[in-house]
Image (spheres, rainbow, N blue to C red):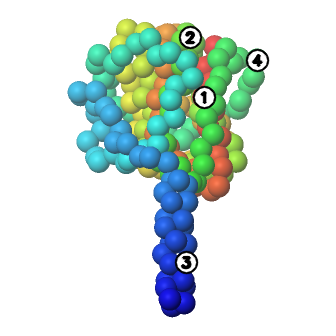
Amino acid sequence: MTSMKPKLLTVTGLALMLAVAAEARPPRKVVVVHPGFPIARPLPHVVVHPPRVSVHVTVRAFLPPLVFGATVVAYRPELVIWEDAETLTRREGWTEFTLGVDGRGRELLFSVHGAAVKVNFAEVVFENGEAQVVDFNEKVVKPGTYRLLDVSGRKVDHVRMVAKAVGDTSRVTLALAK
């Protein structure tokens, strides 16, 4: 009978560790893309952060994809007409998040704060349903502010990104400048 106690404790301990490990990793989903999405490579399984605001426009057509150019820009707060951010953690891994812009401006800026991030893509959806995909091709982006896209006065409904923190925590900020 006494030899059963250590085995029972071991099994109980193992079950508890598996339950904690399962809880520590959020559930993952396949990235959902609309027909015509211009990136052909397999996309990662992601943790989806739900949008904090309603998305008004669905994608009806994709423009030819652009490759992220990593053009560093000076952040000028006086020119920013909209800004929002998302926090990414290493524990979550690949994360999909959507930020509701609902504004018209000249360019979208992309900033990384804290640890670097690895980015798969950004999907910029305009008010007419056209979407511009900016392909990062899983490039590691260091902290700083970069030009994401020249939107030339078009109204942006929302931006969806797939990215992950390279370090413990990263904050990704998108801003629309006039």
The residues tagged by marks 1 and 4 sit, at their Cα atoms, a distance apart of 15 Å
Front disc: 1 or 3: 3
**Placement of 86 over or under 155, stated as above or below:** below
Local secondary structure at mark 4? helix
| Outermost residue to the front | 1
Q: Where is residue 142 in the image (x, y as percent from the top left)?
A: 62, 49
Which circle marks residue 145 in the picture?
A: none
Residue at image position (53%, 49%) is 92
Amino acid carrying label 2: it is Gly
Q: Which of marks 1 and 2 is nearer the N terminus?
A: 2
Amino acid carrying label 1: it is Leu
| Residue linked to disc 4 | 78
Q: Which of marks 3 and 2 is nearer the N terminus?
A: 3
Q: Which of marks 4 and 2 is nearer the N terminus?
A: 4
The residues tagged by marks 1 and 3 sit, at their Cα atoms, a distance apart of 50 Å
Front disc: 3 or 2: 3
User: Dot 3: few (<14), some (14–19), or many (≥20) neighbours within 10 Å?
Assistant: few
| Residue linked to disc 1 | 174
Q: Which of marks 1 and 3 is nearer the N terminus?
A: 3
**Foreground residue, 53 or 8?**
8
Q: Earlier in the sequence, mark 4 or mark 3?
A: 3
* Quadrant containing the C terminus in the rendered view: top right
